Image (cartoon, rainbow, N blue to C red):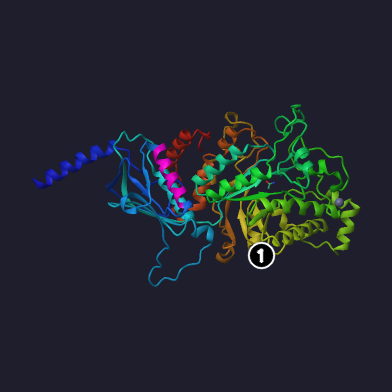
Amino acid sequence: MKNLVVTALLLLCATYVSAQPKADYRIIPLPQSVRTDTTRCFTLAVGAGISYDAGDPETSRIAQWLKQYVEESTGLTLALTPDSKQAAISLTKQQPKAKKGQPQVQLDEGIINSAYTITVGKKGIQLTAACNEGLFRAMQTLRKSLPLQQTAGQGILFPYTSIADQPRFAYRGVHLDCARHYFTIETVKTYIDLMALHGCNQFHWHITEDQGWRFEVKALPDLAKKGSIRKQTVLGRNTGIYDGQPYGEGLYYTQEQCREIVNYAAQRYINVIPEIDLPGHMLSALHVYPNLGCTGGPYEVWPHWGVSADVLCAGNPETMQFIKTVLGELCDVFPSKYVHIGGDECPKSRWQNCTKCQAKARELGLVATPEHSIENQLQTYINREVEQFLAERGRDIIGWDETLDGGLTPNAIVMSWRGTEGGIAAARQKHRVIMSPNSYCYIDYYQQKDQWGAPLGIGGYLPVSKVYSYEPLAEELTTEEQSYILGPQVNLWTEYVAFPQHVFYMLLPRLDAISEVQWTQADKKDLDDFRTRLPHMLQMYDRMGVNYCHTIE
Ligand code: ACM
Ligand code: ZN
């Protein structure tokens, strides 16, 4: 009889419970460990408190965000309280306890700072981390676990759980080309918001190109003023037909705006890595300063896409002065430890025929070797000067994998994009590597087989499932060599992407896939399971009013 009553009560409870909005911890990216007791729930009621360290403005900001997200997702209003005894949700900073007998493993800051735990039990919901960054990641996990359903005064059910999470990779990058097409700082902020939602921590901001210079340099005011404008833009994929419309007047980022983006990202625990792509991809600068090119110009800000033969002259001393002026101001504005100096797609035909470049090669005593041509070594000479200049300012350089072609400079980080070979070679030379192979990480590629249904793109085919399948630790490498791989990054080039809706269509939901590559251990990844967790994210994008690709292959 007693059993019957208990069963009836449980059934009644279950019926009642199922009608109530309920949290679901099966989110993207999937946390490392989630142990949930679905038979017991904590109810977060209207007016419940979130406690935080009131003396720490960062923690209070995180608490404030959590309050806002709970309200936006469910309509439930919470209260902020510094008193943890009154609180249903607590945000606590605490060093993790060392497990008995186990030495503390030294983990990179990018991993350890993002580690957190969430515990839900009868006392409520506890978010714990060693620092604010971890609390921020915990808050995002809780946010993604929330039901997207009005509570109608009932409160939200949180199944009892114990979540322990930390990212697999220290470097979790996302790139955006704001040079081929310019995007407002509002759009850039939304992009950063989406990165934060997915636990990414490095925003690679590509702000100079053949088709437009978009970074204000105060000592060289004409650079952005004139270099930002192209006379027209080619239609389609280099059809030879142009739109006749000038593009880009005033479309560059002032230093004040750059600082605003840096601060906005920093509040979301994202570092901004600026890229000045050199010595190739420089037509916008050559247009303004033709003396910096081997032929002396004239040059135009390119109205079409591709790789230009005209690049900065390696033999002209004014080139190095120009680079240092630009990078000096860049360092004043961007505090990032890493500065990206490009280095990709720099044809050497001009250098081969330039008396200044050849004189410089002789002065440096460069001789061709089976591995490195003289001209590739000239590019390494530029990289070495730049590396030293930036090292004096406490920065490390990142370069595209072409920086291997003339021999790597001592401390260069390689971003592997032409497949994984560059990354593998660099790791074998004990250089740090960011993996961004085009075949898995170029989100300017189409994401659906039927390209007729998609906006015009650069080509390729990179569906969500292929991004998801990416394994950054190349199996060709030993474990020791793999330790040089900092992490993966997706890149969004914007030759064919001119509007914010299109940016987010290209980004989402491939960002979901890469975030799981960045966070989740390889043995826990499961594409079918990922697909079951994706609809909730798409519902969040609908709520946020951001566009995404509905064709998920
Ligand atoms: C690149 O895609 N040219 C780095
Ligand atoms: Zn030259």
Tell me if the residue at label 1 has its CB under 8 Å from ligand 1: no
Residue at the image point whose x is 63% and y is 60% from the top: 432
Which quadrant holds residue 447?
top right
- Asked if residue 322 shows in the view, the reply is yes
Query: Quick check: is 148 in the magenta stretch?
Result: no
Q: Outermost residue, bottom direction?
A: 101
On screen, residue 206 versus residue 1, left or right, reads: right
Q: Position of residue 21 (x, y in %)?
A: 32, 38
Q: Crowding near pointer 1: few (<14 within 10 Å), some, many (20+)?
A: few
Q: Main secondary structure of the magenta part?
A: helix
Q: Outermost residue, right direction?
A: 355
Q: Which residues are magenta?
A: 59-72
Q: Position of residue 107 (x, y in %)?
A: 51, 63
Who is closer to the viewer here, 114 or 552? 114
Who is closer to the viewer here, 218 or 446? 218
Who is closer to the viewer here, 288 or 429? 288
Q: Tell me if residue 337 comes above or below residue 15 in the rendering.
A: below
| Residue identifier under label 1 | 429
Amino acid found under the numbered disc labelled 1? Gln
The quarter of the picture where the N terminus appears is top left
On screen, residue 242 versus residue 176, left or right, reads: right
Query: Quick check: is 62 in the magenta stretch?
Result: yes
Q: Position of residue 315 (x, y in %)?
A: 86, 55
Q: Outermost residue, front direction?
A: 55
Residue at the image point whose x is 42% and y is 37% from the top: 72
- Asked if residue 421 shows in the view, the reply is no
Residue at the image point whose x is 74% and y is 27% from the top: 243
Which quadrant holds residue 261?
top right
Q: Position of residue 106 (x, y in %)?
A: 50, 66
Secondary structure, mark 1, is: loop
